[in-house]
Image (cartoon, rainbow, N blue to C red):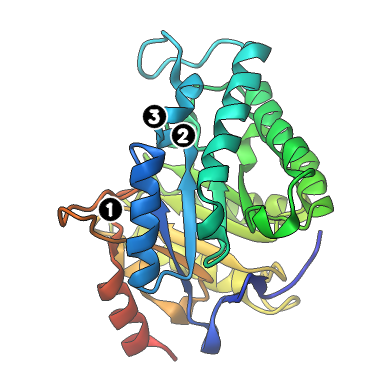
Amino acid sequence: MRASSSLTWGGCTIPGDGGVPAVAVSLTGPTAAHARAQARHAIDAGADVLELRVDLLEEVDALVAFTEAPGEEPSTTDSMVVTTAAAQVLECLRRMADVVDVTPLLLTCRTAAEGGRARLDDSGYSALLRSVLDELAGWEPGRRPSAVDVEVQRGCLLQVSEQAHGLGIDVVASFHDFKTTPADDVLEDVLSRMASEGADLAKIAVWPTGADDVARLLGVCARAAAAPGEGTGLGLPVAAMSMGALGAVSRVAPVFGSALTFAVVPDEQGETQASAPGQLPIQDVRRCLELLRA
C-alpha cells in the first residue's frame, strides 16, 4: 500500500486546498467524439479531473456484445472479446491525448454488476485492465491516464495495483451498491480491504433509503479520512457518495473528508448526462464547496 493523505495528478492535488474535494466530471459519450466535446466543456467549466467511462462509448462495443438478459450474470468472457475490447479502449484513449495534456484523466470501465454497461465476468474484467496496462507500458508517461478505476469486488485489485504503480498510474478502488447502504462495519471493511490491496484512493457510492443512511455514510467517510491512528483512518484519500437526490448533500460537504466528488457539465445542447444518480451541475458543486468549506 502506498499510504498518503493526498494525491497529485498532473497539476491537481486531491483533495485540494483546505481539504476541499477535487471535482471530477465523467465523460459519458455516447461516442468518443462526444466525449472529447464533453471534455472541452468540462475543462472550460473548471473540472479538476476527467473520468473517461469507456463502458459507455459506442466505439468500445465489445464490452456489451453479449446476449444475456438484463440482470443475469455474464458468462465466461472469451479471450478474443477481451483482446478486442482492450484495443478499442486504447484507441479511445489515443483520441483523448490532447485532453490528457491539460487535465488528469481517470480511466473507468464500469461493469454491469456495479451500474455500468460492461458485461464482463471477474476474470474478463481483470484481463481487460491488465491488457490495457500492458499496452500503456509502451506509451510516453505523459500520454497515460493519471489513474485507473478498479472495482474491489472483482477480486483483482492487488494485481492491477501492482501493475499500474509500475507505470506511475494511480489506482482508484471503487465499490457501488445501487440498492442500499450497507452497515458501517461492512463499509469500513471494504475501505480497509481497498487500502491493504494497494488503492491510492478509496471510493464508495451507495444508495440511501433514508436520511439516516446518508448520515451514516458521512460518518464512515469522516472516520476513514481521519489521520492514521485516529478512528479508522486509512492513511489515503477517500471519496464517499450517497446517490440520488436524498444523498446530494454528501457530494458537497467537505467537512466530512471526501477527497473527490463528481459533477455534470451541460453539452452543446444544454443537456447533462450523469454517470450516477444525484450528480449536480459543476457550478452548483463549486458554489456549495466554497460556502461549506471549513
Label of residue 244 in the image: 1
Q: Nearer the viewer, residue 160 or 188?
A: 160
Mark 2–mark 3 contact, CB under 8 Å? no
Say whether disc 1 or disc 3 marks the residue closer to the N-terminus: 3
Point 66% across, 73% down: residue:
8
Please tell me how many numbered marks the rendered image carries: 3
Helix, strand or loop for disc 3: helix
Label of residue 55 in the image: 2
Helix, strand or loop for disc 2: helix
Point 49% across, 64% down: residue:
49
The percent coordinates of residue 263 (x first, y second) are 35, 62
Q: Nearer the viewer, mark 1 or mark 3?
A: 3
Q: Nearer the viewer, residue 71 or 146?
A: 146
* 142, above or below 160, in the image: below
Q: Nearer the viewer, residue 237 or 234?
A: 237
Q: Nearer the viewer, residue 241 or 266?
A: 266
Q: Quadrant of the N terminus?
A: bottom right
Q: Is residue 239 left or right of residue 277?
A: right
Q: Quadrant of residue 12?
A: bottom right
Q: Amino acid at mark 1?
A: Gly
Q: Nearer the viewer, mark 2 or mark 3?
A: 3
Point 36% across, 81% down: residue:
289
Residue named by callout 3? 58
Q: Find the distance from the CA under tag 2 to the CA under tag 3.
A: 8 Å
Q: Find the distance from the CA under tag 1 to the CA under tag 3.
A: 26 Å
